[in-house]
Image (cartoon, grey):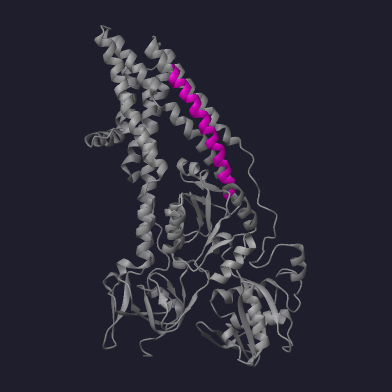
Amino acid sequence: MSSVLDQRPASAAAAAGPRAVPPRRRTRVLLLPEARWALAALVSFLLALPLYLLGAPGWLWGTLFAATYVTGGWEPGREGLKALKDKTLDVDLLMVVAALGAAAIGQILDGALLIVIFAASGALEALATARTADSVRGLLDLAPGTATRLLADGTEENVAAEQLTVGDAILVRPGERVGADGQVLDGASEVDQATITGEPLPVAKQAGDDVFAGTLNGTGALRVRVERDPADSVIARIVRMVEEASETKAPTQLFIEKIEQRYSIGMVVATLAVFAVPLALGDDLQAALLRAMTFMIVASPCAVVLSTMPPLLSAIANAGRHGVLAKSAVVMERLGEVDAVALDKTGTLTQGTPRVTDIRPLPGSGLDADALLSLAAAAEHPSEHPLARAVVDAARERGLPLTAAQNFTSAPGRGVTATLDGHTVQVGSPSLLPASARSHREAVRQLEGAGRTAIVVLRDGVPAGVLGIADRLRPDAVATVAALTHLTGRTPMLLTGDNERAARHLAAEVGITEVHAGLLPQDKVSVVRAWEAEGRRVLVVGDGVNDAPALAAAHTGIAMGRAGSDLALETADAIVVRDELAAIPAAMRLSHAARCLVVQNLVVAGVFITALVAWDLIGTLPLPLGVAGHEGSTVIVGLNGLRLLREAAWPTSPETPPESPVGTAPSPTNSAASGSPIGHKPLSDGAQA
């Protein structure tokens, strides 16, 4: 057995094993045919425009405008013809026909501009789709391509991970990623499974515990029995859920598609009638054609389209200046529809970095807070565990000296042991405490009851003190929860893979009452879908790979930008670049303002279109006046929508202590009781950092 569980240095194993971080895949924009056609249309339009305005020879700018029609109208026209074969009238085809109609009656510039706008829109949609597909494929790189399978005779063989079958035994060396979902048969280690559960700290694993494909093994070696086919691993299921959710159309989108179909069919029928009826009644062919083309121009939905886009694009630009990147106008619109919010814990409400919050020397140890912290940090210094890093960082911030450790050893799930100045020092989990240390265990219970992770320090087998470590709330977490509650009419809920006790303690600090803890990615999706089944429009805010399925399944998903995983950033509809939680309710308020402007613009556009169409049908609308009315309404709604660019009511982050730890309310009373932060004057016994 010792040969099978041979432990190599983590660095060597990591170098020999699969990649720890998947490469970021990016589709090049110009590789997309839609983007190439749109660029060609834009270039030819920009070349033709000054020639047209300066009175250059007609054949010159006419040729360039013709190139604009061909290059920009090729893709939407082709797709429209395909839809026509399926007895579906596509609105893009209708716009191409309208552009050609405008050109037929001499309005070649208007038609070319319409072509360019729709070509650019199609290119952006294709790019967004390609980027989402890239991110989903990139997730598969989290799972290693190969695994070490153990044979019945005790030998090893390297096989492709997809060749593993249920019942196989595999060896996971230090620093390697687990090759399949399974159960630990032998060995002990700590596994970083943040990609699956979102837990900020590695989890101790021993015989009988479950492990997941793609999670990163620590310093121990594990023998694992494969329990799931690789195609059904948690990672593979995340990929499927993201793909399924991305393909699901929102009810608003389905409604718009129905309106587009009815409008398109109605406009075609009406245009043909406007041309055919007067012609049948003896009208001149050219006059009938001119009336029909005028009708098509004034009835075209340009003003309606601009009624929606300028306000939303202005809101997007405004939000972008303040660190919120909405990926489309649809996203900005949906933010204003949200009536329920689900928040992730680690990395979203908290900063995602463990910090020392409590230093408690035990009676009889003869140590003060500085001495206890220095002793623990010196013993932990050779370790790479996140908790050890937190202890060492705390000592360094206070400028404490660290004695060189000798005879350092590490036991996964228990802690470290080292010799310091002739004393044997142990730092690790509360299981190190002797059974007789009842009073010392009370200190541990107090810290754990406050949501901290307790670390005990023993010197020569005698308990010397207890350290409390916790993640820290973001400075604006409390104010953000209150603002979201006000905007949606209900308190946000907490979705986390962390344990129940820590989750509920944090929820109480920020004012959240509904908590769902210990969740895997599919569990988060189930909770979100249950809410949406009740008719709620759910906003999910998260940062990790484990949040991606819920981000995709929700009505709207927002990712935290600084620490967010590639998949979360690609799957989310919007990104908070500077990780300021207060920006989320601010963006929602901006969306509400944009939707109000959309309604105003639709009323204006509707009045103009109705009046111009009625004039053309009842009387004789001169073509120049029809174009002027149509373009005038477009300018009016466009300028009205741009008002949000000057929106200045963007709130700043609340003034709360920047290092408020989870479990420590940011109040003057608590601050006085807890002493000075790490990095200032020494703490007294029992003080909090």
Dividing the picture into quadrants, the one containing residue 435 is bottom right
What residue is drawn where x is 35% and y is 87%? 4
Residue 194 seen in this snapshot: yes
Give the magenta-colored segment's residue range.
Answer: 584-611
Taking depth in this image into account, of 549 and 568 the one nearest to the observer is 549
Location of the C terminus by quadrant is bottom right
What residue is drawn where x is 41% and y is 76%? 210
List x then y, in percent, for residue 359. 69, 77
**446 up-or-down from 51: above or below:** below
**432 up-or-down from 24: above or below:** below
Taking depth in this image into account, of 445 and 127 the one nearest to the observer is 445
Prevailing SS of the magenta stretch: helix
Dividing the picture into quadrants, the one containing residue 78 is top left
List x then y, in percent, for residue 7. 42, 84
Q: Is residue 598 magenta?
A: yes
List x then y, in percent, for residue 183. 38, 78
Taking depth in this image into account, of 277 and 639 the one nearest to the observer is 277
What residue is drawn where x is 39% and y is 14%? 616
**40 up-or-down from 506: above or below:** above
List x then y, in percent, for residue 135. 39, 56
Residue 322 seen in this snapshot: no
